[in-house]
Image (spheres, helix red, strand yellow):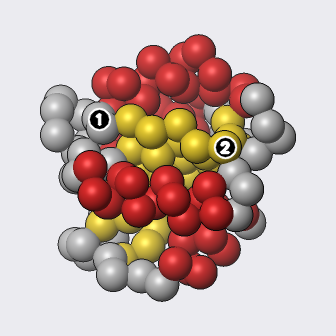
């Protein structure tokens, strides 16, 4: 894997594709998941190779983006986690970045690449 791999978790296919294209345009390798359950499997198998996790707060399924972020930070404390939502900021895990939709593409890049 490249030296900067980002995991995107977004249940909306259009949003997921837009996020992926933005990060790929900056030369990042991107792994996409439609829900938290799939993202958990990716974290378990490739977690040490991941540098960033970008997740929507509202995901279809049993686990929210906040719960996924908490899980990811427990397993990989140095993982850069970015939560995005169209709602106000939820309680976010320590050292996690939050972006309110709509945001500028550069804001996301700055949060991911920090």
Depth order, front residue of 20/9: 20
Residue 28 image offset from top left, x and y in percent: 69, 51
Residue position marked by numbered label 2 in the rendering: 29
Q: Is residue 29 left or right of residue 39?
A: right
Residue found 82% across the figure and 40% down from its top = 3
- On screen, 29 above or below 36? below
Residue 45 image offset from top left, x and y in percent: 59, 15
Depth order, front residue of 76/38: 38
- On screen, 68 above or below 101? above
3D distance between C-alphas at marks 1 and 2:
19 Å
Local crowd size for mark 2, using a 10 Å CA cut-off: few (<14), some (14–19), many (≥20) = some
Q: Is residue 114 visible?
A: yes
Q: Is residue 87 left or right of residue 56?
A: left
Q: Quadrant of the C terminus?
A: bottom right
Residue found 22% across the figure and 72% down from its top = 87
Q: Is residue 20 left or right of residue 51?
A: left
Residue 2 image offset from top left, x and y in percent: 79, 37
Local crowd size for mark 1, using a 10 Å CA cut-off: few (<14), some (14–19), many (≥20) = many
Cβ atoms under marks 1 and 2 closer than 8 Å: no
Mark number displayed over residue 35: 1
Mark whose residue sits in front, 1 or 2: 2
């Amino acid at each position: 894997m490249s030296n900067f791999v980002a995991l995107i978790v977004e249940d909306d296919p259009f949003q997921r594709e837009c996020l992926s294209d933005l990060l790929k345009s900056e030369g990042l390798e991107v792994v996409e998941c439609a829900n938290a359950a799939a993202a958990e499997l990716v974290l378990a198998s490739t977690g040490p190779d991941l540098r960033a996790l970008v997740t929507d707060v509202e995901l279809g399924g049993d686990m929210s983006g906040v719960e996924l972020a908490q899980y990811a930070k427990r397993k990989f404390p140095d993982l850069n986690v970015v939560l995005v939502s169209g709602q106000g900021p939820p309680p976010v895990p320590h050292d996690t970045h939050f972006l309110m939709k709509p945001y500028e593409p550069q804001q996301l890049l700055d949060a991911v690449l920090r």
